[in-house]
Image: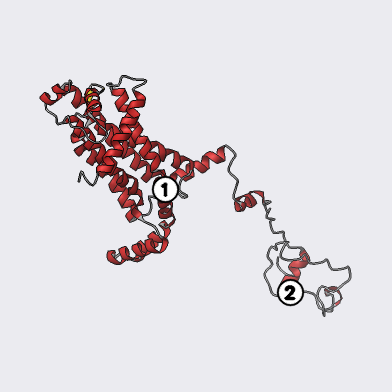
Amino acid sequence: MDTILGPLYAAVSWTIVLFHTLYSKIFDPDGGWAWGLSIVSLVIVIRIALIPLFVKQIKATRNMQVLQPKMKAIQERYKNDKQRQSEEMMKLYRETGTNPLSSCLPILLQAPFFFALYQVLNHIAQNQTISFINKAELASAQKAHIIGAPLAATFTDSAEKLASLDASLFDVRVVTVVMIVMMSLSQFITQRQLMMKNVDTTVKTPFMQQQKMLMYVFPIMFAVFGINFPVGVLLYWLTTNAWTMGQQFYVIRRNPTPGSVAYRERQARLKAKGKLKEEPAEAAKDQAPAVKRQQPKRQTKAQRQQALQAGQEPTAVDPEKSPRAPKSPKGASAAPGKKPAGKSGSRPTKTKK
C-alpha cells in the first residue's frame, strides 16, 4: 500500500513543507500557526483543483431536478412493482446520461489525500521520517501545538505518549472533542442545505434517498472514527467542510436549481430589487382592460306584446345579444298580416299582464 501511495505521500508532504517554509518567515517555525496554516493551505490547493469536479456535481444535481417529473410518473405507474420501478429509473438515467452518484465524487476523490495526510501525521507521531518530512521537519512538527494539542496527537493516546509530546491528556481530549463536534456539525449542515434548499423534496427518488442517507451517515462516521484521527487530520477535514459549506452556499444563492426553494427565494429577491422581468403572459394579464358586464335591460311594451303573440314568455333581454325592437309607427299594424284591433268588428281580448 505504501508503495502504491508513495507518490501521493510525496505530494502531500512536499506541499506541507513548502507552505511551512513560507509561513516560517512570519510565525514561529515550531509553532502551531506555521504548521496549522500549512495544512489549511493544503486543503485550499486540493479544493481549487477539485472545482471542475464540483461544477460537474452541480450540473448532475440540476439534471436530477429536471428529471423529477419523469421520476414521479414512473413511481406512480409502477408503485406496486418496485423491481420494474428501479429498472425504469436506471433506463431513464442511461438515456439522459445522468449519474445519481455524482454528488459523492468530490468526497471520494479527497479520500486518497485524506489518507495520505493521515499517514504523514502518523509517521510524525511515531518519530519517523516520510518522503519530504526529514529529521529537521520532523522535530519541528512534533513541537507544534494547536490550542494546546500536538499536531499528531489523537483522542485515544495515552497520558505517557502525550507527555513525551509535551501535552496533557485533558487538553488533547478537549480539543479533539470540540473539533470532532464542529466537523460533524458542519458536514450535517452542508448536506441538509443541499437537500432542503436546492432540490425538490416533494418527489421521492433514489437521489433524494441518497442525499438523506449522506446527511446522517457522514456526521456519524466522523464522530465514530474521529477519535482515531490526529489533530492535524481533524483540522484538515474541518477546513474542507467549511470550504464546501461556503462554496455551496454561494452557488445555491447565486445560481440555484430551477424549481427549488432557493430558486423561489432568489426570484423574490430579484423582484423586490426590480431586476426581474415579468413573464409575457403575466404582463399581458396585468395590462388587459377590465370588461364591464352590463345588466340586461327590461323589454319594451312592443317587445312584450310581440312575444305574447308568438306564444313566448316575456323575459329580460341582454342588450348585447338581442337587438331592441323598433317602435311601431302610428296607425301601423301590430303584427304583419293582421288588421289593427281598433278597426275590426270584434273587440280584442284583454290580456292579463
The residue indicated by pointer 2 is 309
Please name the residue shown 25% across and 27% down the image: 137
User: Which one is in front, 114 or 129?
Assistant: 129
Q: Amino acid at mark 1?
A: Ile
Q: Amino acid at mark 2?
A: Gln
Number of marks in the image? 2
Q: Position of residue 185 (x, y in %)?
A: 29, 35
Between disc 2 and disc 1, the foreground one is 1
> Among all residues in the image, which is located at the extreme right?
331
User: Which one is in front, 337 or 53?
Assistant: 53
Q: Position of residue 231 (x, y in %)?
A: 23, 30
Q: Is residue 21 visible?
A: yes
Is 120 positioned to the left or the right of 244 in the image?
A: left
Could you tell me if the residues under marks 2 and 1 are in contact, i.e. CB atoms within 8 Å?
Answer: no
Q: How is the image coloured?
A: secondary structure
User: Which one is in front, 137 or 120?
Assistant: 137
The residue indicated by pointer 1 is 58
Could you give the CA–CA distance between mark 2 and mark 1, rounded to whole angstroms? 79 Å
User: Which one is in front, 352 or 45?
Assistant: 45
Q: Secondary structure at mark 1?
A: helix
Is 24 positioned to the left or the right of 170 in the image?
A: right
**Category of crowding for the residue at label 1, using alpha-carbon neighbours closer than 10 angstroms: few (below 14), some (14–19), many (at least 20):** many
User: Of the numbered discs in the image, which one, if any, rests on residue 94?
Assistant: none
Please name the residue shown 25% across and 42% down the image: 6
Quadrant of the frame with the C terminus: bottom right
Earlier along the polypeptide chain: callout 2 or callout 1? 1
Q: Position of residue 307 (x, y in %)?
A: 72, 71
Q: Is residue 219 visible?
A: no
